[in-house]
Amino acid sequence: MREKLEEIKKAAVIELKEAVSKEELESLKIKFLGKKGELTKILRGMGGLSKEERPEIGKIANEVREKIEGIISEGLDKIKQIETEQKLKNEVIDISMPGKKQIIGHRNPLDITLRKTEDIFLAMGFTVEDGPEVEYDKYNFEMLNIPKNHPARGEQDTFYIDDNIVLRTQTSPVQIRTMLNQKLPIKMISPGKVYRSDAADATHSPIFYQVEGLVVDKGITFADMKGTLEMYIKKMFGENVKTKFRPHHFPFTEPSAELDISCFACGGDGCTVCKGEGFIEMYGCGMVHPNVLRNCGIDPEVYSGFAFGVGLDRIVMQTLGIDDIRQLYESDMKFLKQF
Ligand SMILES: [Zn+2]
């Protein structure tokens, strides 16, 4: 039996040394030490030994087992180490390789102009209000004194979702929502995207930006509107810019006016930018129509207000000399980086 154990040990040592993979080691472990393994077979035969022989053979068998287990765990360690080295070799980072360039975006001139506008009005005590771009027809038109058959609807090519829901054509519905939901007095601007079903060309875009404003309080007059807008325009375009109010008509204001400002390019002398006029048409404004106040539950005998609006795209294009509105929406870095 002693000889047999020695044989097993020798064979195990030779075979295990040749094993090069985890799988081979595992199967050799089963072969020698498993339930049906060679060493186990020997140990099962120990019952036939004498009392004196048994401890001695048991001791040798244990030594053989320990030796085999030792070789297996050494082998496994070695394989693990080889695998780790291989992995490190494969994952090597070549720090001399050129890096990936991070492309950093650029603020759109629309955004730059919008933030500047917001800052000026915030400094004058206005709030900045937001509202949904998918809007009720009622808020976009009816409550602004533009009923379903009103000719003014024809001037705004509207995207209708259904008979009662539209993509807002102006940010005025935010004024309605503010009058319905907030306490008086109100001093707010509502900047944001608006939609018209226009085909895109150099001067038209189906999406563009508006900034509108509304003030409602007791004793608000046309003079308050003139003062506020003149202050804003000087902060926005410079102290020397002149303003000119011309009578106009809007359904939601009465009286209404268009506000022209002196040309940035020629200062009022007349040039190609202002088409020789010296002034550029920029804003719509007026005193809030009593019907609009009434629609929002505000008594026009007690309260009055003014409202104004402007296309942000037009300001940006005029001030920066951009002649195609589509450039503002194309995210072309070569274009954007100029501003
Ligand atoms: Zn000019």
Image (tube, helix red, strand yellow):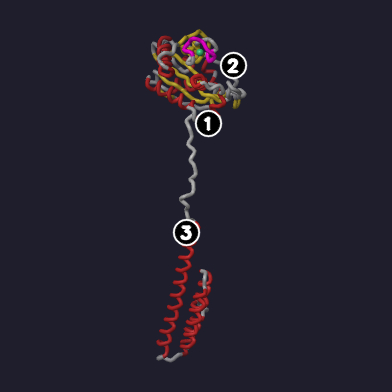
Residue type at mark 3: give it: Leu
Label 2 secondary element: helix
Q: Which mark is residue 185?
A: none
Q: Which mark is first along the chain, 2 or 1?
A: 2
Which residue occupies the foreground of this view, 317 or 27? 317
Q: Is residue 153 magenta?
A: no
Evaluate if marks 1 and 2 touch, with contact meaning CB atoms under 8 Å apart. no
Which residue occupies the foreground of this view, 10 or 215? 10
- The residue to which callout 1 is attached is 334
> What distance separates the C-alpha of mark 1 from that of mark 2?
35 Å
**Residue 244 percent across, percent down from the top left:** 47, 9
* Residues shaded magenta: 266-274
**Residue 150 percent across, percent down from the top left:** 59, 14
Q: Which mark is first along the chain, 3 or 1?
A: 3
- The residue to which callout 2 is attached is 155
**Residue 302 percent across, percent down from the top left:** 41, 11
Q: Residue furthest front?
A: 96
> What distance separates the C-alpha of mark 1 from that of mark 3?
43 Å
Q: Which mark is first along the chain, 2 or 3?
A: 3
Evaluate if marks 3 and 2 touch, with contact meaning CB atoms under 8 Å apart. no
Q: Which mark is residue 88?
A: 3
